[in-house]
Image: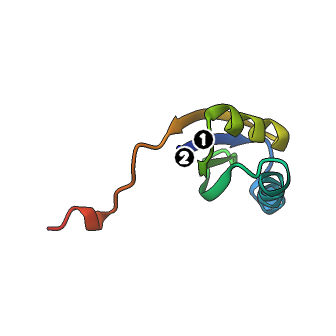
Amino acid sequence: MPRYMVVRSFEVGQDQMAAVGQRSRELAEEQFPEIEWEHSHVVVDDEGLVHTFCAYVAPDEETVYAHARALGLHKVDAVYEIAGDVTPADFPS
């Protein structure tokens, strides 16, 4: 199944992200069982706005967008299909 990187900008502060993450997980489990939330990287920009880079397994982009619409409180900046993963261990010195 394809994997996607979802780039998001949130309308809530960092202190509210735990509740947003809980809601995202609940939505995935209850309404979107065909997707799997692998992990997210959370960043806060210089203006205090929260952005996330989330890896999902999903049958297609539309399912990713449907989950995002159900979650609300953010906009999806981009969705990319993940072509692969690398780590420093893949490039020995």
| Mark 2 secondary-structure assignment | loop
**x%, y% of residue 41?**
58, 57
Q: Which residue is drawn at 81% across and 61% down?
A: 22
Tell me the quadrant of the picture where the C terminus can be found: bottom left
Displayed quadrant of residue 26: bottom right
Say which residue label 1 marks.
7
Mark 2 / mark 1, whichever is N-terminal:
2
How many marks overall? 2
Q: Residue at x 66, y 41 (%)?
A: 8
Q: Which of the two discs, 2 and 1, sits closer to the camera?
A: 2
Q: Which three-letter amino acid code belongs to the residue tagged 1?
A: Val
**Residue 54 visible (yes or no):** no
**Residue 34 visible (yes or no):** yes
Displayed quadrant of residue 71: top right
Q: Residue at x 18, y 67 (%)?
A: 92
- Residue 40, placed above or below residue 1: below
Q: Badge 2: how crowded within 10 Å, few (<14), some, or many (20+)?
A: few
Say which residue label 2 marks.
1
Displayed quadrant of residue 42: bottom right
